[in-house]
Image (spheres, rainbow, N blue to C red):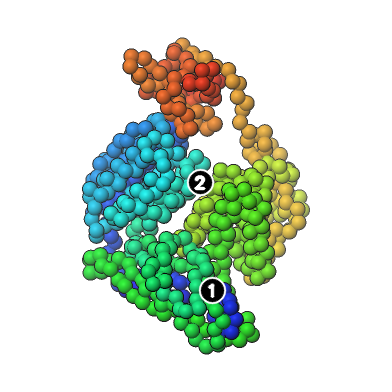
Amino acid sequence: MLKLSYDFEQAILPGNTDLKANLLLRFGADLPQSPRRDLNLSLVIDRSGSMAGWPLHHALNAAESVVDQLEPTDTLSVVVYDDKVDTPVSPHAVDDKTALKTSIRQVRAGGITNLSGGWLKGCEYVQDNFDPQKINRVLLLTDGLANMGIRDPKVLTATAGQKAIEGVVTSTLGFGQRFNEDLLISMARAANGNFYFIQSIDEATEVFNIELASLRSVVGQDLVVTLELADGVSLVDTLSLAKVNPTDGGKTEITLGDLYEGEDRCLGLSLSLAAIPPGEFTVMTLHYSANTVQNGEVQQVTGSAEVVAKLGTVEEAAMAASSNIILELSHLMIARAKATALELAEQGKVQDAEQALQTLIQELEEKGLNEHFEIAEEIEQLKYFASRIAQRGLGNSGRKELRDQSYQTLTRNRKDLVGRGVEVGDEVSAMTVVNEVGSGIELQCFRQGGKLRIKALSDSYDAHKNVQFPRAIRAEGARYVVEGLELSKDGSFYRVQGKIVRLTKAGEVDNFATSYRSSPPKTGKASRGPASAADLPTTDVVGDGVLVQCVKAGSKLRARVVADNYEPDWNMRFPRSVREEGMLYVVDEIKVGPNGKSYIACGEIKRFVQPAVSS
């Protein structure tokens, strides 16, 4: 059966007054230990030009790690796509892992991004092998934009929802900084799947493993909650990210998706209550249902429960706040504020967006919640995003962090998914730099589970404790010197005191200096080639360059740009001496030709060599 627990933000609410009350509902599965459900899984991987090099290398390593964790009773297919869609692994029982991994290892980067073609092929494979007793899932990984095939986000999102009705759920994984986070989040939400932001190329395997662990722990699917509110009670807001639909008779239906073993599915609600006398009052009746595995079969489980609030005097209510519930609800309110601020900023209401975040910061600090490390970290995130928005400098990477942080908090109850972010701002380069620690305290920034954490390196300080530190100047690997550290009231973490400077010792390269991090200037001069392609320098990194491929067009060899945001069919001025069919190149710069319908390769040309996938 399903289990339900709930708590109001205050154990006793003030009676005889109109009020707003926040409520946290938790759903879980109280089921006997059931065997692991088999998977019917399709991995759909972008191999377009923008994935060339280490991004694709790490994505393929991640795919191999999935193979290692599957069983012979699982079904796996692997689809790769650029402008073409290929199937290195057709739907197959995972009974020969070596052969499967060998097929994956042979994938190479290619052209532009036909996201819809690759994704729909993965859906087709899962549908063809659909089994209601299995978890039927497509994992779609992309680093780019849908610029071939079906490109309309509304159509892709609606199709994801339709596929979910047919039993095929899609989880989306955005890789790097070029992908469309709005599209991937919308597709995941419509399909009742999950969304992940793979922020750095080396964490692909980690994120794949989180999703695979989630699939293994699914104990219920299609959790739907219906609210039947009492007279005098109205729903002000849904604090969690869920599908909310009013139904006949004034009821509200909320779809929450999957239930995971050991992970409560949380639903935060903000309610308005009319003046109610002291005593117990039934705020609502809940009706809920989900599909769970019982006795080896998928069966629907239903239940109903009453949510009862206790009301008392103002004095009784003031003494009855529950700190744990306040913390959990605060995380949801912070996530909602982030989403609201982004929406306001993108409507041009920058001051309103900044004010929404600053007001919440003040409220959290007035409640003393900054004495809890995770909320203190969230406050630093809010300050960081408020500053970025005020300066109109949120940028692409900042936007992705903001959307990801909001999404993860509002959908999953996993600490390893919330608060992640590794963006390095310009503030790091602008910091004062010293060459020695002197009488200060040395700190260093580490990445742990996608989060930037600060630890003390100096003696006399506990290196295991986190340090509360401004988010704007965190950068993985950076070291700092501060004047002092102060323990939090509960002794669980440190706070920085005094001035902060960055540390680069004599003889060390300053990896965060502006001059070191900046790209070499573009020459704008048309490229010249050596006698043959064999004489070109090689590289396995695209970096700030542009990927080009030589293709056969009729009887001629043509150079084509295969990176996103370029026209794939335009001809290009490119040295004939180095053209070889199928070869990939990295050029410094691509300019539009004088006719406005062609390209010119500019600067140095290197031959691109695909990094070998680990065996």
Q: Which residue is mark 2?
A: 199
Q: Is residue 605 visible?
A: no
Taking depth in this image into account, of 55 and 146 the one nearest to the observer is 146
Q: Is residue 175 visible?
A: yes
* Quarter in which the N terminus is drawn: bottom left
Q: Amino acid at mark 2?
A: Gln
In this rendering, the answer to whether 497 lies above or below 177 is below
Please state the horizontal and vertical placement of residue 443, each as a whole percent of the image. 66, 52
Q: Name which residue lies at 33% across and 65% down.
A: 220
Snapshot quadrant of residue 459: bottom right
Q: Amino acid at mark 1?
A: Ser
165 sits to left or right of 157:
left
Q: Nearer the viewer, mark 2 or mark 1?
A: 1
Q: Residue furthest front?
A: 249
Please state the horizontal and vertical placement of residue 595, each as a whole percent of the image. 51, 17
Snapshot quadrant of residue 588: top right
547 sits to left or right of 140:
right
In this rendering, the answer to whether 131 lies above or below 595 is below
Query: Mark 2 and mark 1: span between their CA atoms?
Result: 39 Å
Q: Name which residue lies at 52% across and 32% down.
A: 543
Numbered badge on residue 272: 1
Please state the horizontal and vertical placement of residue 574, each as a whole percent of the image. 47, 17
273 sits to left or right of 558:
right
Q: Name which residue lies at 52% across and 28% down.
A: 545
